[in-house]
Each structure stands twice: as C-alpha cells, then as structure tokens.
Amino acid sequence: MPEPGYSLKSYGWRAMAVVPFTISDDHGHDISGLLSLEEEFIVFDVQVKKWGIFDEPPEKVKAEFGLIDTIRLDRGIFKDHIFIVPKRPDLLKAVPGTHKGELKLKVAKRYWEQAQELVMEVISRKQRRTGA
C-alpha cells in the first residue's frame, strides 16, 4: 500500500494526495485503507482486520470516475468524512464495510488538506470528462 500524505505518480512533477481512511462495519471488523488516484480511476486500497489480526490480504478496488455520481468532503467534530455516491451499487459491494447508499470514509483531521485536494481533483476530472 502507498504511504499516507503525498506520492509522486505518473502525472509529471505534481504530487498527488494519498488519504488514509477507516470505514464502519456492522460485523465488528476494523476496516482501514488508503484512497488515491491512478490515471482515470479512484483507487481504494482496503485492509480488513478481524479480531485484532489481518485475516485477508489487502484488496485494491478501482472505480472509473464515470461510476461516481457525487463526491464531497465534510468536516466532523472528531473526524472528517469523504462521501462517495456511486451511480450503481457495484462499488458499494466491492468495498468492504457497511454502506447505506454511499461510501462514508472517515478521515483523520490531520489529512484534511490531502482529502480536500483529492476530492477537488476527482470533481475536476469528472467535469472534464463530461464537458460540464
């Protein structure tokens, strides 16, 4: 998995944000991961922790920007949140955790800047693709 913060990708000199997150789960599993961008995809590197150990290898879920209906970043009291509403439920099924119509990624406050940059980049790329 990439490290949180910034990583140099194939976008030239520009550093792209890598945002660590956690997801709630009704089954008591700890779900954490890293959110990043890769070419025309938003990438979820997800690790599921059961009973204090990692039972399964990390999963990589890639979603084309066209599969995302909306994405937004909200400030919270203890953690901030990235909300991703997909156009189809396939993305909700692919990312581990409990989801109610949207992905709710909890982000530590110290990663606000990286999260904001990533969300704005996704919105910008979606607009360029649709010509909006």
Image: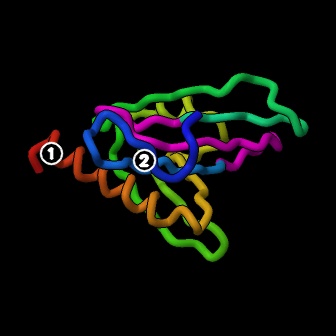
- Residue for badge 2: 85
Q: Pointer 1: residues within 10 angstroms few (<14), some, or many (20+)?
A: few
Disc 2: CA contacts within 10 A as few (<14), some (14-19) or many (>=20) = some
Task: Identify which amino acid the numbered label 2 is placed on.
Answer: Val
Residue 96 shown left or right of residue 19 in the figure: right
Q: Position of residue 111 (x, y in %)?
A: 54, 62
Q: Position of residue 119 (x, y in %)?
A: 37, 55
- Is 109 drawn above or below residue 22 in the view shown? below
Q: Position of residue 73 (x, y in %)?
A: 44, 62
User: Reading the chain from its start, which is encountered first: label 2 or label 1?
Assistant: 2
Residue 111 in view, yes or no: yes
**Residue 74 bears which disc, if any?**
none
Relative to residue 30, is residue 112 drawn left or right? Answer: left
Residue 114 in magenta stretch: no
Q: From the viewer's perspective, tell me whether residue 112 is left or right of residue 96.
A: left
Q: Disc 2 versus disc 1: distance between alpha carbons?
A: 19 Å
Q: Residue furthest left?
A: 131
Q: Which residues are magenta?
A: 23-44
Give 57 or 98, whichever is nearer the viewer: 57
Determine which quarter of the picture holds residue 107: bottom right
Instruction: Please tell me which residue is depicted at 23% across the width and 52% down the height of the picture.
Output: 124
Predominant secondary structure, magenta span? strand
Quadrant for residue 49, please give it: top right
From the viewer's perspective, tell me whether residue 100 is left or right of residue 66.
right
- Residue at 49% x, 56% y is 82
Mark 1 highlights which residue? 128
Position of residue 71 measured from the top left corner of the image (x, y, whole percent): 38, 53
Q: Is residue 49 above or below residue 26?
A: above
Q: Secondary structure at mark 2?
A: strand
Identified by mark 1, the residue type is Arg
